[in-house]
Amino acid sequence: MDKKNEILHNKFGREDLEKQLAEEKFERITLSFYKYIIITDPVALRKKLFIKWHNLKVKGRIYIAKEGINAQLSCPKPNWENFMESVIAIKGFEDIPLKIAVEESKASFLKLTIKIKNQIVADGLKEFEYDVTNVGTHLSAKEWNEHMDNGATVVDVRNHYESRIGHFKEAIKPDVDTFREELTLIKEKLKNKKEDKILLYCTGGIRCEKTSAYLKHHGFKDVNQLYGGIINYAKQIKKHNLENKFIGKNFVFDNRLSEKISDDIISTCDQCKNACDNYTNCNYTDCNLLFLQCENCKRKYDGCCSQDCRKMSKLPKEEQKKIRKDRKRPSLNSFKKSIRAKENIAERKRNS
């Protein structure tokens, strides 16, 4: 390909991308994968993958670092074999485990984004605080259930907004917004359990890799992790007719926001407090707050988190752009996020 014609980033706006997706005549496979592996030239790999996957109409969010790759994406079913060939052609990726989504959806991603990062999962740790080649024991769904039945300590290695809509029964669920905050808190919560059997779980397994390595480095003797995370667990319990010990939905980091694992609804609408497990982002662009909203409130507030945002969302787009440009803070979201976080913490304390 002529270097002048190489496409290395998305060139369309959201409305155009949504239109393109709606006009597709094929189905898509949504999947995720990760691998800790030394990548000597992340920039060259990014360029190679972007050109190849753009041509295959792959969409998704991929992070590449010198320590490995973390990918969440969707691939057209007709291009699946070519996509797989592009993955296994990379040295070290030949046996990379793929986690296929529980629920299929064309709208999981609108565009292809591949970014170079310092880490594939931001954790704030120093290199000497963990050894990612020394991780916990990987457990199948059957083994996981057996250890739960025998009283092992279960730890949710996700953020509070993820566990809010779904989690394993009796799991320890750290009250944090980021993985960076979580590691030291988990270590503190487990400080008297260094000899106990510890079970770690997350969405697809990547955060458990770091957490298990971190705990083992700090003297925990029996650290285990759910292989393939909640995504793989859901597939295994269905395939092998096992008891489902996960209640609610699994939060996912794409446009779907969640996948149903059980029929239980364990959370409530942030506006009317009725049973609800549907996350959405505030329809006012300058807010974009992630929150739970039932269908009644969605109609009442036009998909916004408040009447103020509802009024702002009705302004002409050019006026909204001017407000965003003139705003001193980067966005309204950061301010409202901190308020909602405080409200959620206070509510959880009242209900505990």
Image (spheres, rainbow, N blue to C red):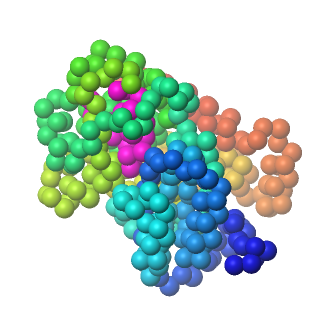
Residue ID at (56%, 70%)? 53
The residue at the far bottom in this view is 25
- Residue 214 coordinates in the image, percent (x, y): 41, 28
Whether residue 311 appears in magenta in the rendering, the answer is: no
- Residue 51 coordinates in the image, percent (x, y): 63, 71
Horizontally, is 297 left or right of 274 in the view? right
Please tell me whether residue 163 is drawn above or below residue 80 in the rendered image: above
Please tell me whether residue 28 is drawn above or below residue 311 in the rendered image: below
Residue ID at (38%, 21%)? 218
- Given residues 327 and 220, the one toward you in this image is 220
The reply to whether residue 296 is visible in this rendering is no
The reply to whether residue 342 is visible in this rendering is yes
- Given residues 318 and 29, the one toward you in this image is 29
- Given residues 109 and 63, the one toward you in this image is 63
For the N terminus, the image quarter is bottom right
Figure label count: 0
Horizontally, is 11 left or right of 76 in the view? right
Residue ID at (37%, 46%)? 205
For the C terminus, the image quarter is top left
Q: Quadrant of residue 154?
A: top left
- Residue 187 coordinates in the image, percent (x, y): 39, 22
Horizontally, is 152 left or right of 264 in the view? left
Residue interval drawn in magenta: 198-216
